[in-house]
Image (tube, rainbow, N blue to C red):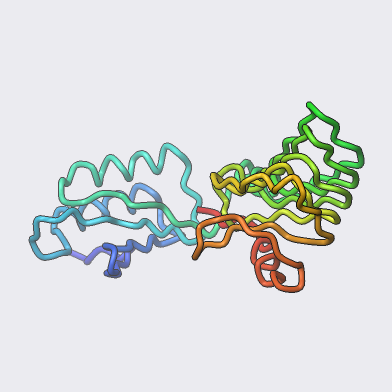
């Protein structure tokens, strides 16, 4: 009997196992080989759960196919799917990615009681008056005065920044972190950047020249998990 072609390559990592799927093999053959591998148990017996990363390469797996793989793995108590890693994205995922990283431009004044809320980065050409608020899942750039509230990275992205031509905000927020309101006698500053300081775990304001490296990192987009 001719031996089966090896369609799944296995690599051990510090966090478990990575299964590299053949990109050109038929899906049902991959499932059969995955079942055989798990039945023969590629790891010495141990009590801990073994986490598996499925590396798809340039093969696209739809929701039903991922569900089938999860069901195969679930039949073996020692193993658990950690994640699927792919070099390709669906059309919907691509559109969502561009929406999250695109910069939306508004030319207006944000008055008291008004709110601008965008997915992605926000470029506002105008002032944010006291009582006004701007929110973005990415960075916020204001070519004008920031006197109200600005909330960047509202979906949890602590790498987001807030930049304003004139910075005298009522409040700055980055992800789940909030800066205190400045003292009433404190004057605003020109061309400053608010960012989250990881070591001190607080929002700080500094000159653009000093935080160029932070701005550069935040502009590289959102990683696709």
Quadrant location of the N terminus in the rendered image = bottom left
Q: Position of residue 74 (x, y in %)?
A: 23, 42
Quadrant position of residue 99 = top right
Judge from the rendering whether residue 38 lies leftward or rightward of residue 184; answer left or right. left
The residue located at (61%, 48%) in the rendering is 179
Work out whether residue 78 or residue 60 is closer to the camera in this orientation and state it. 78
Say above or below: 16 vs 146: below
Looking at this rendering, what residue extends furthest in the front direction?
185
Say above or below: 191 vs 140: below
Judge from the rendering whether residue 187 lies leftward or rightward of residue 5; answer left or right. right
The residue located at (50%, 50%) in the rendering is 60
Say above or below: 122 vs 63: below
Q: Is residue 94 visible?
A: no
The residue located at (25%, 63%) in the rendering is 4
Q: Is residue 83 visible?
A: yes
Q: Position of residue 171 (x, y in %)?
A: 68, 43
Q: Position of residue 3 (x, y in %)?
A: 22, 66
The residue located at (14%, 59%) in the rendering is 41
Q: Position of residue 158 (x, y in %)?
A: 57, 54
Q: How many marks?
A: 0
Quadrant position of residue 217 = bottom right
Work out whether residue 78 or residue 222 is closer to the camera in this orientation and state it. 222
Judge from the rendering whether residue 161 lies leftward or rightward of residue 148; answer left or right. left
Work out whether residue 202 or residue 98 is closer to the camera in this orientation and state it. 202
């Amino acid at each position: 009997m001719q031996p089966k072609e090896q369609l799944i390559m296995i690599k051990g990592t510090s966090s478990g196992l990575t299964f590299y799927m053949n990109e050109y093999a038929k899906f049902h053959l991959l499932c059969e080989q995955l079942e055989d591998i798990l039945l023969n148990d590629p790891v010495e017996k141990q009590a801990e759960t073994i986490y598996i990363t499925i590396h798809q390469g340039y093969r696209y797996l739809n929701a039903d196919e991922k569900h089938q793989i999860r069901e195969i793995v679930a039949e073996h108590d020692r193993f658990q799917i950690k994640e699927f890693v792919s070099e390709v994205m669906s059309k919907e995922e691509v559109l969502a990615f561009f929406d999250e990283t695109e910069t939306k431009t508004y030319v207006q004044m944000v008055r008291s009681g008004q709110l601008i809320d965008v997915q992605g980065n926000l470029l506002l050409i105008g002032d944010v008056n006291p009582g006004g608020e701007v929110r973005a899942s990415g960075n916020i750039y204001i070519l004008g005065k920031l006197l109200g509230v600005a909330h960047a990275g509202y979906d949890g992205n602590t790498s987001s920044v807030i930049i304003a031509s004139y910075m005298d905000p009522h409040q700055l927020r980055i992800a789940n972190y909030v800066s205190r309101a400045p003292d009433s006698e404190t004057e605003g500053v020109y061309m400053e950047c608010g960012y989250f300081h990881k070591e001190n775990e607080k929002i700080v304001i500094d000159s653009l020249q000093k935080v160029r490296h932070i701005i550069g990192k935040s502009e590289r987009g959102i990683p696709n998990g």
